Each structure stands twice: as C-alpha cells, then as structure tokens.
Image (cartoon, rainbow, N blue to C red):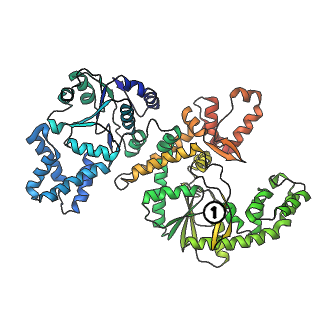
Amino acid sequence: MLYIDLKKKSDTKSLANNLYKTLSRYDAISLDIFDTTIIRLTHTPQDIFALADEKARNLGICDFLSKRRQCAVSAKFQFGEKTNIRDIYNLMNEEWRLPPEKLAELMALEIDTETENSFINATVLDIVHIAERQGKEIFFISDMYLTSDILKNMLNKLGIKGEFRVISSCDVGKTKRSGELFTYVVNEFELHNKKLLHIGDDLRSDVFMARCHTCFSSIYMPRLQCDVCDKIKYYGSSLFWSKEKRWSFQSIAPMLWCFCAWLERKAVELDMDKLFFLTREGAFFYKLFNIFTEYRYKTDILYASRRSIMGASADINWERMYSYFKNANLRFLQEVYGLEPSRVENIALKYNINVSDRLDEHDAGIVRDVLETLKEDIIQASEVQKEYLLQYLKTLGIDKRNGIIDIGWKGTSQACLQNIYDSIGGDEKFIGLYLGEFSDSQNKCEKYGYLCASDNTKRKLDVLNAGFIFENVLSLAVGSTLRYEKYQNGIRPVLEEDMRSHNESIKRAHDGILAFFTMISRVRDHVCIDEEYAVNNMFDTFRKPSLSEAKVIGDIQYMDANCVKYIARPQGIIHYLRYPRDLIGDIHYCGWNTGFCRRLFKLKLPYFQLYKFLKRTK
C-alpha cells in the first residue's frame, strides 16, 4: 500500500517524481469520488443541505433541511443499498405533493449546490491525465445515493473529461464498505487477469476491502480534517505546476483573498464613490479585486507613479521635491519633465557630473547649484504636467471620495494628488487603502493599511522583510509612468520601457494566485477563509522558509539598471570566504535577507529573529 500525505512536502514531491512509474505497473485504476476526487468546500457533507435549504426557500419550500435529513434515513431503511436521490425526493414529496417538474427542479437545485461547492483534487487530476496518456482503463466508484449519470455529469462539470466509467453503489446495490462493489467491478468489466490499482481516503472501504475482495492494490490518500483554506492549499494545487505557481497558490493567494475582502469592507465603510488602482502593483490588485467582487464596484486603473505625480506637483512644494530630486539623477529629471537633452548635458559638463550618477553622491553644494539651475525649467514643466494630469484624471471620472489602492508604503503619491487638487480649490478627497502603510509625519492624508498601519505596527518588520518580494511578485509587466503627454484629442501616460515582460517566474507566480481566486470565487458566499491563518501562513514562509521555499522565492528575477538580478540568490560560501566584502554587499542589496541566509548557510537558524534585532538596533 502506498500512503500519500498531502501535508508533507516530501510526499508530494516523491509522488510527483514517481507517479508515471507507479501507474505504469497497472492496467486499470479506480478512484473513490467524494473526499478523494471531489473535495467539498463545506466542513461537512450535511452543510450542502443547509446551503440548498436557503435556495429552496425561494421556491416556497420552508422545511427542506429537516425533511431532507429525515427522508434520507427513511429511504435507506426502506430501499437498502439501492437508495438513490430520486427515492429520497419521492419520500419527501409524499407530504409536499409537488408536481413532477417542481420536484425535479428541487432535486436539480441540490445537485447544482453540491457541484458549485466542490472542486477537483488537483493531485487526482494529475493521476487521471497520466493514466489517460498511458492508456489505462479508468473507473470512478462510490458508495453514494447519487446515480452514476449524475456523478459523471458532476465530474465533467468540475473538469474531468475523457473516457472513464462511473459506478455508484445505489445503481448496483453493492458497496465498497462490504467489498462487494470491487468484486462487481472486476466481474462486470472482466478485469480478472489485469493489474488493478484503487485510490481512496477510507482505510476500511478503499484499502482493506479493495485488497481483501479483489486483486486491487491500493493507495491511501487520507482526507484533511480542516478548514477550507487548508483544503484549497493541499488539494487545489497540482503536483505538476511550476514551483512558483504552487508557492503563490498555497502561500500568498489566501492572504490576497483576505486583502480583497478588507478592501471591499473599507470601500463600503468609508462610503467611497470610486476605487482607483495605481500601476504597477495596483493593476494586479485591480484584476484580483474584480474577480473577488464580480465587478460590483466602480473601479479603474490609474496609470501613475510617484515620479509622475510628484513631477506634477514640483511648483506646489519645491522643498519637498528638492529632497526627492537629490536622490535621483539628471537622466531621471530629463525623462520626467521632458527637459532638453542638450541643456541637461551642458549642466552635467559644467558641474563635472555624469547624467546617470545619483546627485547625492556629489558635494551638497554642487547638488543645490544643479537643482537651482534647473528649478525654473522644472517648475514650468511641472505646471504643464499638472494640467495634463488633471485632464487625464478627469477622463477617468474622479469623484468626491476616491479610494487609492496600491501596495503602500507611505502614501506619497496619494499626498501629492491631494495637494494638487487642494491647490486648485477642489473638494475631491483621496483616501489611501494599502497592503501595508507606514507612518509619514509630512503626510496628513486619510490612509489605511491591511497588513500594518501607523496605528498597528505589529507586523511592520514582517512587511519590511517581505516588502521587496511583494513589490516584484505583485506587479504586472507594465512600465512605470514617467509623465503625461497630449495624444490626439486627449492625454495619455508615458510609460518607461518595461524589462519584465518576459519574466516567466513572475508570470507563473501570477498564474497560481489567479488559479486560487478563480477556484474560490465560485463559492465566495458560502465559505470563510480564516484571515489570521492566511496572513500568518504567508509570513511563516518568509520568516522561516524551507530550503526549497527559499530557492523558489529567491530565484524570482527582477530588473535593476537593465541587469537581471534575483530576490535572494547568494554566491557560494567558498566565494565569500575568499571575498568577505562581497558577502556584506550582497546581503545589503539583497531583497530578502532571511531567504538569502537560509540558502547560504542551509541550516535551520533564527534568521528572521536576527533580522528583527538588527532592524531595531539601527
């Protein structure tokens, strides 16, 4: 007997590596249906009846739940192992006296509810696909009151297509639990001389009875006694997905689902007229939020960046802009404000600086002289940019109370937008809703953070530890907004060239998140994901990653100065012994220190605790 525990990573990896080999030894396979192939998103099977009861009330049936449970017991006593769903509904109708078409509608309602609140175990789907490619005969067998035709239709709807047979105990009057159903399958389909494999979640019915009554071998796949989040995590992701897709599905997607739920609550609580999602991270949130809410809210993507919005507000607060500019370079100022290249080159020659060098790398006096020389050009260009930005926002339908959704952190873009509208006497308000929000004494705008906020810093160090991962994994392949320009009869954003359009690792991570949202959105009104669990589950991965997790996340690529870099990919320890200064530099510029150290030293040490200590002592 092969035992598969989906909660153990070594087992899933072992199964993935050996599945072809395992199945190749057999001529036919059979699979249990419920809790093995089909996973219910409810805590118990009886919860399906409660959900159906809500819908039945719309048909004028007020006692569906109690009657359904009572008649299931009565039908079993009356018809034995051949009890099917039609027998149960006929008993229910002895009191209701519904016309046949109304009774059929009620029965279809229960079957649809069962289907809507279920999904296919991706591991089983992998097994079926492999068996099909190897030319195996495939059977699905179940001790169930649903007939074979109903079960086959459910399997088709949930994603299992192709050639297979379905055998239900209610059709033949024999059960797995007695072992007689296995004997029936062997005899009926002439499998006596074939090597057979059965896969199921019940030790007695699917393992012992399969082996005792027939020539079946067995794989034991125990069900998870857990909440929906765990069910999705362990059953929902395919063993043959990419590592990035599997990681994002299991770790980060549940947190983002809860983040979207928080966004919806805040939008209602704060009486927002419209929600604007800032590129680049916000554009991915826009996609997820609309899947979550089924497009029930007024939303739009706002092509904007800190540089484009601050570039339009230089005339409002020059001193703040001065602090921002000195951390940039002349090439940046040229791109944002559309300055004449020849003028920028002349200033660079005059002060003996390179257009690509950060200004703060030079003497403070030189920096101030350079910026004062360009001040008039910048302010003139800023006034034009402000006018363009206001026209662009007008086309998007800026309203009285506008939500600004982004990854975070200090809400600088939100503050600049508010300053621009305040400077022209506008009464529009911009309220920030961020994945994480850090305090900023200069920003007095109304803003809120999900993972951490100014008034809730409990997870601040967790967010700092994972912030670089968020910024790369949660952004779409869209260039940053440089400025705005006239185009035909309107205004359009000017985007810098995006170097991540071919970044396959981020695409695969996005696929995992979208797969989670697509799966769970079908039953969003009937399930509740434990928010505390989802957030802690994600942060646990970032705090104390396994070696494989550190490698999967650390190998995600990003672009920096047109160079491909990695979130946390150390060089060999021998290299650092020879060149210790490289270690200091690599850790300093690494995007995820905890993962970097885990990969470098390979030992289970409290790297995150050390990271917290160093952050607090700075």
Left or right of 480 on screen, residue 149: left
Q: Which residue is mark 1?
A: 304
Residue at (18% x, 33% y) in the render: 175
Residue 618 visible in this rendered orientation of the protein: no
Q: Label 1 is placed on what type of residue?
A: Ala
Left or right of 388 on screen, residue 21: left
Q: How many marks?
A: 1
Which image quarter holds the N terminus? top left
- Locate residue 425, reporting x and y percent: 64, 79
Reply above or below: 616 against 299.
Answer: above
**Observer-nearest residue: 196 or 325?**
196
Residue 495 visible in this rendered orientation of the protein: yes
**Observer-nearest residue: 85 or 215?**
215
Residue at (56% x, 70% y) in the render: 396
Residue at (83% x, 51% y) in the render: 361
Residue at (38% x, 24% y) in the render: 24
* Image quadrant assignment for residue 563: top right
